[in-house]
Amino acid sequence: MSSRLPPPPANFRPADHVTKAFVSDTAPSFVRPQRRHGRRALGIRYEKAVQDYLEVRYGQSYIRSPWLHFANDKDVWHWCQPDGVLLQHERRRFTIIEVKYQHTSDAWWQVEKLYRPVLEFLFPGWECARCEVVKWFDGTIAFPEQTKLCEEIGAVPFGFFGVHIYKP
């Protein structure tokens, strides 16, 4: 945990003052398939392995990479796509899942400042949990809040940013 807030990722835009939102059945028109090489390709392969694992582990309770379309108080529409959302209907709880090959503060910015406001708009009154799934965890990385290593993604303790280590 760090007392100083690490900088956001390059070109990051938070979801401020969400006033409208919905889950889209289709990707936005600007999305184009791209070939990745090197470290980016490694991260994409890791994310696919994690996604496959989460779908098997949680079944229909897990939503893989949903496209979210939302508007702010200026009625400007934006898109975002969390890596995954785990729904626990009986607990009225959802867990935002961000997959990273290695632990990074970028996960906090994306989850806390972009996905969380949109999903809290979509699930009013539900408890929000947050979890980064990583292959490599380094506890010395500057992170805006206290993390907690979690063996079970669906049981991230309240008040912590969960980190689940998954090695396929």
Image: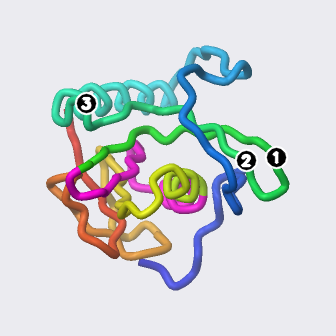
Decide which of tag 2 and tag 3 comes sooner along the chain: 3
Amino acid type shown at disc 3: Gln
Report the residue that reaches farthest toward the bottom: 3
Residue matched to label 2: 71
Decide which of tag 1 and tag 2 comes sooner along the chain: 2
Q: Which quadrant: the C terminus? A: top left
Give the percent coordinates (x, y) of residue 163. Answer: 30, 58
Give the percent coordinates (x, y) of residue 75. Answer: 82, 49
Q: Residue at x 59, y 69 (%)?
A: 6
Q: Decide: few, some or many residues near mark 3? Use Cα within 10 Å; few <14, some 14-19, many ≥20.
A: few
Residue matched to label 3: 60
Amino acid type shown at disc 1: Val
Q: Is disc 1 in contact with disc 2, using a CB cutoff of under 8 Å?
A: yes
Would you place residue 98 above or below residue 162 in this image? above
Give the percent coordinates (x, y) of residue 77. Answer: 76, 42
> Does the segment drawn in magenta span residue 12?
no
Report how far apart the C-alphas of labels 1 and 2 lie in the structure. 5 Å
Q: Residue at x 64, y 54 (%)?
A: 9
> Which image quarter: residue 43?
top left
Check residue 76 in the rendering and tell me which mark sits there, or answer none. 1
Amino acid type shown at disc 2: Ala
Decide which of tag 3 and tag 1 comes sooner along the chain: 3
